[in-house]
Amino acid sequence: MQQKWWSVFFGAVLFACFAISVAAFFVPGWWLPHLANKDSFGLEVDLLFYLILGATGFFFLLTEVLLVWCM
């Protein structure tokens, strides 16, 4: 019973972190400021940031789901 509680707890924390991260895209002021230098390298830097964020976020979620599943 103790082990199942920890799995549910970590699963709930994982879901809460995911929900807050998704909500940050839609709530003004929770995410990065608006792009100030669109004419320079701003768009490329933002694209690279989102690409790295997506890759690391995917593998983070994958490892956390495996952690909860193996508990």
Image: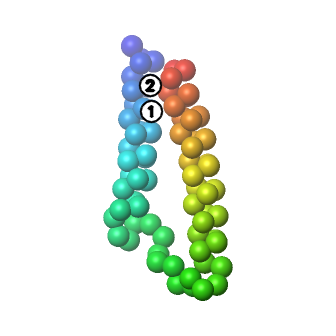
- Camera-nearest residue between 35 and 70: 35
Residue 39, by quadrant, is bottom right
Residue 7, by quadrant, is top left
Above-or-below relation of 4 to 55:
above
- Camera-nearest residue between 2 and 35: 35
Residue 67 % position (x, y)? 55, 28
Above-or-below relation of 30 to 4:
below
Residue at image x 45%, y 18%? 3
Residue at image x 43%, y 46%? 18
Whether residues under marks 1 and 2 lie with C-beta atoms below 8 angstroms apart, the answer is yes
Disc 1 to disc 2, C-alpha distance? 5 Å
**Label 2, residues with CA under 10 Å away: few <14, some 14-19, many ≥20:** some
Residue 41 % position (x, y)? 65, 79
Residue at image x 46%, y 77%? 34
Residue 4 % position (x, y)? 41, 18
Quarter of the picture containing the N terminus is: top left
Q: Amino acid at mark 1?
A: Phe
Residue at image x 51%, y 31%? 65
Which label was assigned to residue 7? Answer: 2
**Label 1, residues with CA under 10 Å away: few <14, some 14-19, many ≥20:** some
Q: In this figure, which residue is indicated by the disc labeled 1?
A: 10
Which label was assigned to residue 48? Answer: none
- Camera-nearest residue between 45 and 13: 45
Determine the secondary structure under disc 2.
Answer: helix
Q: Amino acid at mark 2?
A: Ser
Residue 52, by quadrant, is bottom right
